[in-house]
Image (cartoon, grey):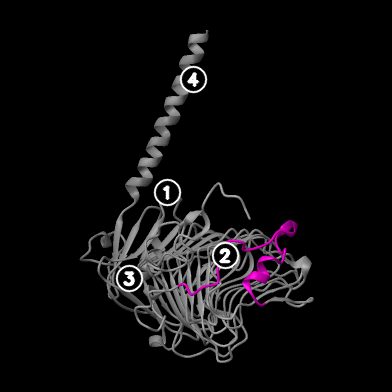
Amino acid sequence: MISSKRNKLKTLFMLFFVGTFFIVCAETSQAATYYVSNNGTATWTQCTNINTPCPIQTAFNNASAGDIVYFRGGTYNVPAKNAGSTYHGYYEPANSGTATSPITFAAYAGETPLFNGTAGGSADVSDYATIFGTFGRNYIVFDGFKLQSDNGTKMARIHIGSDDQTIRSVGITLKNCDINGGSTPISTQDNRETVRIDSADNILIQKCKLYNARSTDGYQGISGIKSYDSNKVTIENNEVYNAESGVYLKSATDSWIIRNNWLHGNQMSIYITPYVTTAARNATNHQIYNNVIANNTYSGLHIFGETGSNADNLVVYNNTFYGIVPDSICVFITESHGSHFYNNIMQGCPGNQLSYGYAPSDYSIAESDYNNFGSYSFQVIAKVYNPSDVFGSLAEWKTSGELIGGLNPDTHSIASNPNFTNGSGLLTQLTDFALASNSPSRGTGKGGTNMGADVTTVGTGGSTKTIQPPTNLRVQ
């Protein structure tokens, strides 16, 4: 009897294994490589041949899990979008991929597909053209596309996700892209952005160049990347410049990683705004590290929370902040409890190098140490409005008792010229921010590491190496 039961179990196991094997094989065997061109006319079954490419819409209608669709070089003119809404792209995949078999839309090797959109359709606005979207689709890769609108005069745009928190996009990757926000500054108090992430999770934006997201009046809602209701997003090895807000986490974001980015020439390079007016729209558990953030007109990292909101468990380390514009600031953090801030360089920033909180209840600092506050006039502000405590020297700040439990911050920090190599002489190029061999920020960071960013791993040309925080160290 026992032997019979064992045989039945073995048979059931083998049937399950064989069935699973054939399902996986069937999925794999159906996946294929396809080709698209700006003058393609072939059917879907024909465009597996590189010499008979199909039109764009045919590819988006038919690509399924595991398929790779290559777009040949050339200009793809996209009509105005007159169906759907601003939360849809003119082109959207009809199907989803899977975690192990995504659908990949990619530039053919060595070629650049340039999508030239048309702003002002009835399902867009006069300022931009939303070219790609992922409304409710999952596991999609966009790789190597260049986007513009109206021949570069208006904003081109990608929308990841939807306007409905119950219809989410998961596992979307956007990489090696170039998106032009347009040469015409935008006149509006509404949101505009080259990449919008909305109701989405597990998203990767990697090695993209996003630029020209400018407003006629400095409105911060004009941005390179903007997000609502999105979690576990990684923004790495991008270059974002000439935007009002480079990376804007506007509402309800959790567990983002912002690393290895070259963010420069913006009004604010990283802007985070938790609020509670209508509901808890917090910004929690974010990590920001190994970025070079330079030459902003207002702020490098700006967390401007509504009183009572939550930007807790923030970790900021090994970033290089630089700015010499009058009244500009390096870092402004409010509504964050349990924050960690170490191994950062803050050179310049005449407004102040670092500000914490509106009032005593609005913030708590778990760790602030091993930072270089630079050689400009020192100023750190705590309790910005109620009442403000202004520390005019590093020595004064070191005895402030501002850490949790009344401990003193930045006991190992310095305030010295970091001695950047500055090959251009202007501190405008990424490589300018490498540390010279005699830099006081070399080997004086936490655990004997360097302070500031490793520029060899930053930007679209940098490796995607992860800078790990030192371990097994006591918080000072």
Residue, disc 4 = 9
Q: Earlier in the sequence, mark 4 or mark 1?
A: 4
Q: CA distance from mark 4 to mark 1?
A: 30 Å
Instruction: Using the image as rendered, state which of residue 311 and residue 432 is in the foreground.
Output: 432
Please tell me how crowded label 2 is: few (under 14), some (14-19), or many (20+) other residues with Cα within 10 Å: many
Residue range in magenta is: 392-418
Residue 276 in picture, x, y percent from top left: 74, 69
Please tell me how crowded label 3 is: few (under 14), some (14-19), or many (20+) other residues with Cα within 10 Å: some
Which amino acid, mark 2? Ser
Question: Which quadrant would the C terminus be assigned to in this image?
Answer: bottom right
Location of residue 156 by image quarter: bottom left
Asked if marks 2 and 1 touch (Cβ < 8 Å), the reply is no
Name the residue located 53 percent from the left edge and 57 percent from the top edge. 446
Location of residue 454 by image quarter: bottom left
Name the residue located 50 percent from the left edge and 63 percent from the top edge. 318
Please tell me how crowded label 4 is: few (under 14), some (14-19), or many (20+) other residues with Cα within 10 Å: few
Residue, disc 3 = 55
Asked if marks 4 and 1 touch (Cβ < 8 Å), the reply is no
Q: Secondary structure at mark 3?
A: loop
Looking at the image, which residue sits at the far left? 51
Which label sits on residue 413? 2
Q: CA distance from mark 3 to mark 4?
A: 51 Å
